[in-house]
């Protein structure tokens, strides 16, 4: 073969290889672009972490072009991620429906639009007393004596921080309602409020109990252990760091904990007792919430979701809400449908 022709053939072959390589890279780049998924950022109450893991899988299987990204906090903190920290979440889901209008039905810092003007109610539950078989007096406790057991000096009680989490201020309400139910005045103080400095002030005005929290919740004894969210108390239960905690039924049953069902007059889960629940209030009106009225009044527990006005993907968030409403029955740890 002529050397010139051989060199020409090699040159043509190399040129074709280069063109082919460029084409493959270009096609791969186009494919990656077409396969980019829409990030749907969701901030939720910690008590929803377990069921939302399954909801995420279901939703993404139905919408393969969407990547659901979930983050959990106490309900108050979940809303503040958007309203105070300006983080770009597309959907908020909390354990107290009344927090949304209080914290979000007002103008954003920039512009006149509210953070949101609506929300969707999607679940309900009740408070129970959760424990394990290694908790002190686990073999003795029952629906008849639970309030006596948790008052014993050697029993350690876990409290979710009521400043950050709905389960925390609801735990205080349950203990106050128990005082009324059992005609006592020691349950709330001996289990919880009597073990903090600064002091937690409790007043009783003609049967209406008002609990005013200090700016900082600092336990003064080993009787009470406090964590930022109720979900963080579960590991303490499992390891024996605490003996009992007031938790949502959906969480306790979803995680396989032992629990005591509480009377409907006490458990914040029965709408027939709404008037009784409303006799208990917890005041969160300290410096960090000075612009809001965050006095929480007892009501039946209802979960709700809202799409912030700052959402980048409101249509996708709306689709997720629809799936939660229509296709989440039977998911472990999910609140009961309304």
Image (spheres, rainbow, N blue to C red):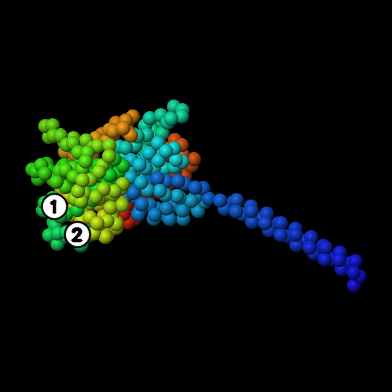
Q: Is residue 282 visible?
A: no
Secondary structure of residue under mark 2: loop
Does 193 appear above or below 59? above
Between 243 and 154, the one lying in front of the other is 154
> Between tags 1 and 2, which lies in front?
1
Residue under pointer 2: 135
Q: Which residue occupies 78% across, 63% down?
A: 14
Whichever of callouts 1 and 2 sits on the residue coming sooner in the sequence is 2
Estimate how packed mark 2 is, as few (under 14), some (14 to 19) or many (20 or more) residues with alpha carbons within 10 Å. Answer: many
The image quadrant that residue 173 belongs to is: top left
Farthest bottom residue? 1
Q: Residues within 10 Å of mark 1 (few under 14, many from 20)?
A: few
Which of 124/147 is in front?
Answer: 147
Residue visible at 42% across and 46% down? 42
Disc 1 target residue: 153
Image-based side of 74 in relation to 10, left or right = left
Considering the numbered disc 1 on the image, is that residue within a helix, a strand or a loop?
A: loop
Q: How many marks?
A: 2
Q: Residue at x 43, y 55 (%)?
A: 57
**In the rendering, at what x and y percent does residue 77 appear?**
35, 42
């Amino acid at each position: 073969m002529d050397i010139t022709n051989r060199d020409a053939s090699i040159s043509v072959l190399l040129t074709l290889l280069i063109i082919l390589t460029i084409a493959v890279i270009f096609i791969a780049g186009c494919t990656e672009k077409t396969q980019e998924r829409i990030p749907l950022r969701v901030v939720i109450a910690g008590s929803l972490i377990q069921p939302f893991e399954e909801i995420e899988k279901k939703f993404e299987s139905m919408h393969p072009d969407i990547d659901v990204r979930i983050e959990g906090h106490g309900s108050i903190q979940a809303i503040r991620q958007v309203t105070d920290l300006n983080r770009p979440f597309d959907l908020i889901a909390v354990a107290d429906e009344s927090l949304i209008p209080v914290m979000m039905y007002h103008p954003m810092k920039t512009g006149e639009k509210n953070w949101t003007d609506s929300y969707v109610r999607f679940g309900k539950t009740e408070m129970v007393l959760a424990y394990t078989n290694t908790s002190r007096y686990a073999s003795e406790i029952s629906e008849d004596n639970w309030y006596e057991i948790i008052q014993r000096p050697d029993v350690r009680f876990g409290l979710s921080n009521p400043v950050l989490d709905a389960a925390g201020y609801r735990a205080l309400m349950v203990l106050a309602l128990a005082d009324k139910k059992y005609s006592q005045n020691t349950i709330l103080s001996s289990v919880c409020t009597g073990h903090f400095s600064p002091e937690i002030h409790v007043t009783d005005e003609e049967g209406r109990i008002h609990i005013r929290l200090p700016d900082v919740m600092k336990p003064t004894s080993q009787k009470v252990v406090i964590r930022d969210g109720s979900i963080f108390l579960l590991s303490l239960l499992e390891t024996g760091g605490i003996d009992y905690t007031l938790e949502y039924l959906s969480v306790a049953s979803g995680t396989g904990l032992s629990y005591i069902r509480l009377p409907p007059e006490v458990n914040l889960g029965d709408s027939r007792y709404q008037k009784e629940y409303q006799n208990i209030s917890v005041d969160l009106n300290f410096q960090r919430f000075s612009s809001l009225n965050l006095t929480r009044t007892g009501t039946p527990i209802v979960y709700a979701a809202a799409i912030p006005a700052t959402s980048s993907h409101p249509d996708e968030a709306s689709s997720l809400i629809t799936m939660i409403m229509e296709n989440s029955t039977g998911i472990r740890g999910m609140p009961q449908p309304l």
